[in-house]
Image (cartoon, rainbow, N blue to C red):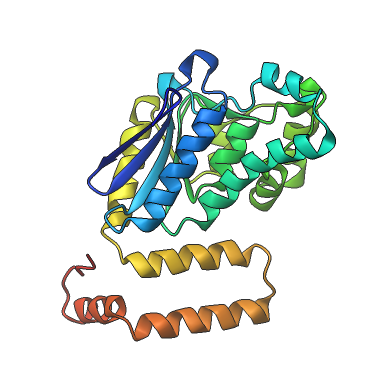
Amino acid sequence: MNKHCRIDVAQGVMTIWNCNAGQRNALTPEYYAGINAGLERATNDAAIHAVVLAGEGGFFCSGGNLNALKLRRELSMPDRRAKVDELHAIILGIRACPKPVIAAVEGGAAGAGLSLAMACDLIVAGESAKFTLAYVKAGLTPDGGASYALMQAMPRATVARMALLGTPVAAARMYALGAISDLVADDAVLGHARDLALKLGAGPEQAIANIKSLLNAAETSDLESHLIAERDAVCDALGGDEGAEGIAAFLDKRKPVFR
């Protein structure tokens, strides 16, 4: 925990807060350190079942601080790349975390904040939230995997307007296109995200981790390779304790107890 990042854990749900509300939760080195530490803890702590990313002050994340980006103009190309790689390490860390990660988007997500949200397994957004690729308005290009994730989730024409014109997209539109998982009232975002996390926490831990891995791999895998990965995963599950409990509960017409 530090001045720009706070971590709360309750009922097996870790909430990682961006605490830079005065700058609409722009990214900072302190937040990077906090989220990296939180993801590592969630990965290694069996008592943590899911992670929620949230921002203080009613806004998820506005992305990079332009004053900080201005200073990077003075850096060498290798040093600039190293700075961007710090963000990319977080994106990869969210994807690699075996626990489901949920973005609780209040207000909006812009620039690298949108990248953070799109890296998560589930996105809960408030009805008035907006999603913006603001890079082009500052003469910059996307990072954090934003262009990749958006092209995976939405039609090219919609992503092109976001990327080439900086056009904001309302949460309702993102939801209609299937880019976000849950659309709720503005004052219900965090509660809904935590409810989802609790539901995930009642599920089979290893199966959920393996499902997340399969979903990640499916974005770039060929069919034959993916069939092999699915085969191996389901065979492992059939021989494991979670599979035994799940099958027995289904046949006994009762609710399974996985944890």
At 49% from the left and 43% from the top, the residue drawn is 36
Q: Is residue 179 above or below residue 255?
A: above
Q: How many numbered dots are placed on residues in this image? A: 0
Residue 145, quarter of the rendered image: top right
Residue 68 image offset from top left, x and y in percent: 68, 20
Residue 197 image offset from top left, x and y in percent: 33, 48
Q: Is residue 17 visible?
A: yes
Q: Is residue 124 visible?
A: no
Q: Determine whether, in the image, residue 85 is placed left or right of residue 93.
A: right
Q: Nearer the viewer, residue 177 or 98?
A: 98
- Which quarter of the figure is the C terminus placed in? bottom left
Residue 211 image offset from top left, x and y in percent: 46, 67
At 27% from the left and 79% from the top, the residue drawn is 241
At 47% from the left and 39% from the top, the residue drawn is 35
The residue at the far top in this view is 22
Residue 16 image offset from top left, x and y in percent: 40, 36
Residue 244, quarter of the rendered image: bottom left
- Which quarter of the figure is the N terminus placed in? top left
Q: Nearer the viewer, residue 21 or 184?
A: 21
Q: Determine whether, in the image, residue 31 is placed left or right of residue 133.
A: left
